[in-house]
Image (spheres, helix red, strand yellow):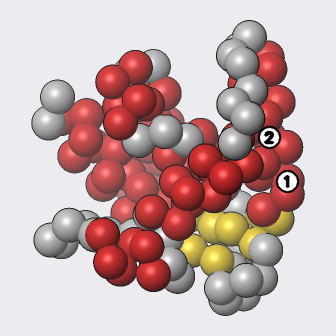
Amino acid sequence: MEGDAKNGLDDFDEWLDRYLTNIKLRQDHPYVGDLIKALRGHPTGRSRIRVLEILESQRKEAGLPMPKAFEESVQSSFNRHSSDSKVFERNKQKNELPLFFSWGGKGSGKWAVHENNALKWLKSHLISL
């Protein structure tokens, strides 16, 4: 069983790397892969502020410009895929699984990722290309 869990984590890294290098997916689903990467491995979540700092740092390191509404754009991506968000409930597709949730409940300021759902999402979006 432990070996299976390890293989799943290795698989996750491969799929996440494939997503992060896919320009079309990054355009269609901005910040989703970045959020998964920042939250993965933190089962009790990370503070929203820390996640925004990580994503901003990654953009600067990559030489990417900072959008004027960066924080709002990241929040929007989180909400679009969060089980705690009315936006997700209102817009989700049939059988769509939530990728994110608020550790401690909505408004807690702590974001987390449903890792199993995230891996399924990455695979399904990459395979459909």
Up-down relation of residue 119 to residue 106 (above or below): above
Q: Which residue is mark 1?
A: 50
- Residue 128 found in image quarter: top left
Q: Which residue extends farthest bottom?
A: 105
Left or right side of 127 for 34: right
Residue, x 82% and y 65% (percent of image)? 47
User: Residue 88, can we see it?
Assistant: yes
Query: Do callouts 1 and 2 mark residues in contact (Cβ within 8 Å)?
Result: yes
Task: Give residue 10's position: percent from left, percent from top.
Answer: 47, 39
| Label 1 to label 2: alpha-carbon separation | 6 Å
- Disc 2, SS: helix
- Disc 1, SS: helix
Q: Amino acid at mark 1?
A: Arg
Left or right side of 86 for 31: right
Q: Which residue is mark 2?
A: 54
Q: Mark 2: few, some, or many residues within 10 Å (few <14, many ≥20)?
A: some
Residue, x 53% and y 66% (percent of image)? 79
- Residue 42 found in image quarter: bottom right
